[in-house]
Image (spheres, helix red, strand yellow):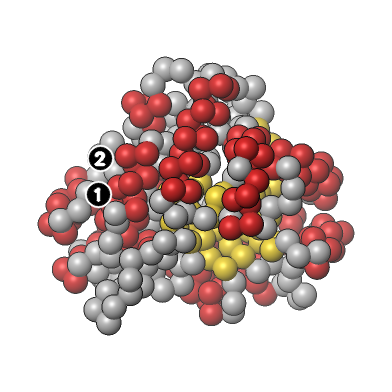
Amino acid sequence: MEERPITDTAPRLAPLGLGLAALGRPAYITAGRDASLGGDRSVEAMRERAHALLDAAWERGIRFVDAARSYGRAEQFLGSWLAAHPERRAELAIESKWGYAYVGGWRMDADVHERKEHSLAMLERQWPETLAALGGRPDRYLVHSLTPDSPALADEALLDRLRELAASGVAVGVSTSGPHQADALDAARELPDSPFATVQATWNLLEPSAGPALARAHEAGWFVVVKEAVANGRLTPAGDEADAAALATADGQPLDALAIGAARAQPWADVVLSGAVTVEQLDANLASRAPGASADASGPAPLGALAEDPAAYWAARGARAWA
């Protein structure tokens, strides 16, 4: 992945990956997405947009792409793009996730868009679906949205199957969600003969609580991917976070760039996902830089003061409308 040169005074920045959560289905929970996408949410229109973003990401040096079984047709869109450019596959790291099924029927007004099930039967059903959609194996395959009470932490038959996948060369891991991400991640890491060695977690200026657990995972040799760095659009010009916007202005960069840059500057981050749905958004994410000394993301203030109570943050996220 192309990166700015690192100097003695420039902080190391994690490279960007492209996440397809907002590009693979007609409805999602990102603020401002409706204005960015317009009214045509047909399969053909969304496929065309996904391919355009994948082309733009490739041209800009991005080599990490994230999808999931629950992201509508994201895996299929990625698979058809790969089929059109087979020479690119060897340079790409492809990550996908199992444990949620997309049940929205390509409807904006679906009562339920996703269904969660962390079982061996679900893995055995979704792994072949992933292979068929992508046209081959992903490099990383994650349990989607692991929580401390997930059966995936205690089902020995499931864990043995994941160990088999890991032994075959697929990097097996977890993604985390909810106010207890740190507990779930520590539990996955501390399992006897844990099959897991990679994590995708939410970390942003409003919800940084997983940071210490991500640092522990990184120290243990895990590969760490950051998702939702712009807090589902709250930390963008489409959001309504006046304090964060003021800090971004003082730091001399747009709010979304500040949020992405803060995540990229974390010493334990290996990749930070961009959820861009337009090339302009992708370019803004790529232009991000680490916050200046007056807005140090690791300190108690001023960026540290943006952090919310994790339970309140996740309750608000769960109440967001799909649009």
* Residue 211 in picture, x, y percent from top left: 44, 68
Choose top left, top right, bottom left or bottom right for residue 166.
Answer: bottom right
Q: Which residue is mark 2?
A: 237
Packing grade of label 2 (10 A; few <14, some 14-19, many >=20) is some
Amino acid under label 2? Answer: Pro
Residue toward you, 159 or 61: 61
Q: Residues within 10 Å of mark 1 (few under 14, many from 20)?
A: many
Residue at 25%, 40% in the rendered image:
237
Mark 1 and mark 2 lie on one chain; the one further toward the N terminus is 2
Say which quadrant the C terminus sits in.
top left
Please name the residue that numbered disc 1 is placed on.
255
Work out how far the residue at label 1 is from the one at label 2, CA to CA, in angstroms. 7 Å
Question: Residue 40's spot in the image, x, y percent?
Answer: 46, 18
Residue drawn at x 58%, y 55% is: 92
Image quadrant of residue 105? top right
The kind of secondary structure element at disc 1 is helix
Side (left or right) of 110 relative to 165 = left
Residue placed furthest toward the bottom: 8
Is 163 on the left-hand or right-hand side of 68?
right
Tell me which corner region of the image, top left, top right, bottom left or bottom right, holds residue 25.
top right
Q: Relative to 90, is 278 on the left or the right?
A: left
| Proximity of marks 1 and 2: CB atoms separated by less than 8 Å | yes
Q: Residue at 58%, 58% (x, y): give it.
A: 91
Question: Disc 1 residue type?
Answer: Leu
Q: Is residue 55 above or below residue 194?
A: above
Residue at 38% in and 36% down: 278
Q: Is residue 53 visible?
A: yes
Q: Residue furthest right?
A: 157
Location of residue 85 with respect to 10 vertically, above or below: above
